[in-house]
Image (spheres, rainbow, N blue to C red):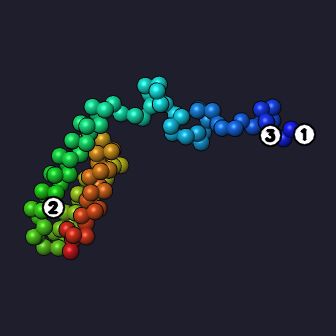
Amino acid sequence: AEGKGAGSGQPSSPPPSAPGSSAKAEGQGNGFGSQPLPGAVDDGQAEVRKLLAKVDEELDQTARKDIQWRRLHFKALLLRWHPDKNRSETPEQAGAVFRHLMGRRDRYLS
């Protein structure tokens, strides 16, 4: 007669370890969460900026080549920087470069 309450067997929110719980509940404050250290974020961002500058320089230097060469070159760059294929950088770094390449695609291939 009381309906849904503390004794109904239905918790008001899932426990932190339950599937479907929020990412905020998972691992914050325990040292094992996905939150990187502040210094690591700065280092990672600096490395991404270096990688983007290097890729931009390469695209700028080859922008005057014929379109067929640029298409093949761009495809090779996409394969190189795809987060699932890249083995030399972290998936986050490779993903950032890959997204940057996709943003420059139309301009490079026009």
Q: Is residue 53 left or right of residue 99?
A: left
* Mark 3 neighbour class, 10 Å CA radius: few under 14, some 14 to 19, many 20 or more: few
Q: Are marks 2 and 3 in contact (CB under 8 Å)?
A: no
SS under mark 2: helix
Could you tell me residue 5's position as x and y percent?
79, 36
Residue drawn at 17 percent across, 46 percent down: 50
Q: Residues within 10 Å of mark 2 (few under 14, many from 20)?
A: some
> Can you tell which of label 2 and label 3 is closer to the viewer?
3
> Marks 1/2: CA distance?
71 Å
Kind of residue at badge 3:
Lys
Residue at the farthest top position: 30
Q: Report the amino acid beneath label 2.
A: Leu
Q: Which residue is mark 1?
A: 1
Q: Which residue is mark 3?
A: 4
Residue toward you, 84 or 49: 49
Disc sitting over residue 59 in the figure? 2
Q: Position of residue 15 (x, y in %)?
A: 63, 33
Image quadrant where one finds the N terminus? top right
Q: Earlier in the sequence, mark 2 or mark 3?
A: 3
Q: Quadrant of residue 11?
A: top right
Report the mark closest to the observer, 1 or 2. Answer: 1
Label 1: element kind = loop
Q: CA distance from mark 2 to mark 3?
A: 62 Å
